[in-house]
Image: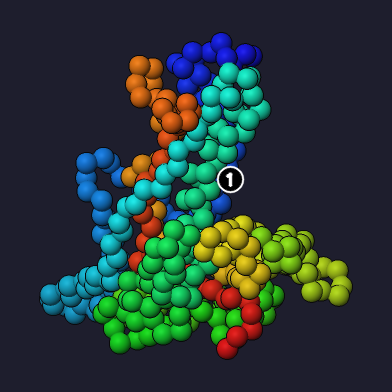
Amino acid sequence: MELNTVSLGDFCKLATVIWIRGFESVDPAMINSGLVKVMNISEATGNTREFSEIDTNEYLSYKGEGDQAARGKVQQGYTKTMTSYRVAENVGITYEMRTQNKYPEVVSALLAAGRKGANTMDLDLSHRITFITATSYTDRDGRTIATTAGDGFQVAYTAHTLAGSSTQYRNRLANNPQLSKGALEGMERLVTENTYNQLGEKKTATFDILFTTDDPNAVNTAREYLRSIASPEATHAGVVNVYQGKYKHVVLPRVATTAVGAPDSTKRSYWGIASSMMSSFYLGIWEAPHMIAPTPNSNAEDVQTDSWDFRNRAGYGICVVGASWVKFSSGDATA
C-alpha cells in the first residue's frame, strides 16, 4: 500500500479500521470484573446522575386475627452524585508519515490511540480500588478525586454508618492479612457478621467475586485455592476443596499503580471479595471512547505542522454509593 497515493477520505476509513482494532485489543478488566455496574447515558440529559440505595425491612410482622397488617418500612440510604468528565488527545499523522509511505508508524500510532480510551477508563475505575482506603487522591492531571462512599467515609473502613440505624459495620479485614485460607475465612466472617441493610438488619447475599492485583503470588494463591480438586492444604487424599468454583477470580492489573499509572509495589497484595448483585459501584458512559477523523475540504490539516489531526475522545463518570457489597484487605499486615 502506498500512503502517498491515498486520499484523505480513504485514509480516514483506513484509520478508523485500525483504531477499532486497537480498541478491541484491550481487555477492560474492571468493566468485565462484575464489580462495576455500567450505565449508558443519553445525550442532552445533563452532566450529572444521582444514585441512592433504598432498602426495605427483611421480615414480615405478626398479624393477629382481624388486625391491620403492618406497613412495610422503606429506608433510603445515602446518596452520591456522579459528574461526567471528558478525556481527550489528538493524534497527529504527519506529512512525512503520509508521503514517505511510513505505514508501520501510522499503524502503531492509530493502534495506540485506539487503546488509550479504554485504558484510561480502566485506570480510573481501578483507582477506586487502589485508593479504597483513602477519601480522595490527586490524579495524573492534578485533579482531586473524591473516593468516599455515601456515608462520607472511605469505601474500605472499620466503622461505616447506616442511614436508618445507629449500627456501624466494617468492611476492612482486621490486621489486613495477605490472601490465605484463614484470611479468606475471615473475609467470609465479615460477610456473615457485617453485611446490613440501612435499617440495621442482617442482609444475606452471595459474594461471588474474589479480586486480586496481578501480583504473581496473589494470582497463584487465588488459583490454587479456587481450582484445586482437593483442599490445597491437605496432607492426604480424599479431602474436598470447599472453595473450588465458589468465587470468580478477577485479576485487576491496574490496581497496584500510582496515580499516574506507574507500578506501586506497596499495593501489590490488595485483595478482597465482592457481591456483583449488591454492588453500588457505577460507571456512567456519556461518550464511549471513539475517534473523530478529519474530513475532506475542512481544516483537517494543521497549517503549522502539515499533520492531519485525529481526535481521540471519551466522557464518563464514576461513583461508589455504598460499601457493604465489598470486603477488603490491603495485605500489608497493618492493624
The quadrant of the image that shows the C terminus is: bottom right
The residue drawn where x is 57% and y is 39% is 112
Q: Position of residue 280 (x, y in %)?
A: 39, 62
Task: Answer with left or right where residue 325 lies relative to residue 27.
Answer: left
Q: Quarter of the image containing the N terminus?
A: top right
Question: Which one is in front, 239 or 210?
Answer: 210
* Residue 207 visible somewhere in the drawing: no
Report the front residue among 104 and 66.
Answer: 104
Q: Residue at x 47, y 26 (%)?
A: 306
Q: Residue at x 49, y 50 (%)?
A: 120
Q: Position of residue 226 (x, y in %)?
A: 69, 62
Residue underneath mark 1: 27
Residue placed most toward the observer, 258 or 47: 258
Q: Amino acid at mark 1?
A: Asp
Query: For this view, does 83 lie left or right of residue 6?
Result: left
Q: Is residue 79 left or right of residue 335?
A: left
At x 54%, y 74%, the residue is 328
Where is residue 329 drawn, in percent x and y?
A: 57, 76
SS at circle 1: loop
In the rendered structure, the answer to whether residue 297 lies left or right of residue 109 reads: left
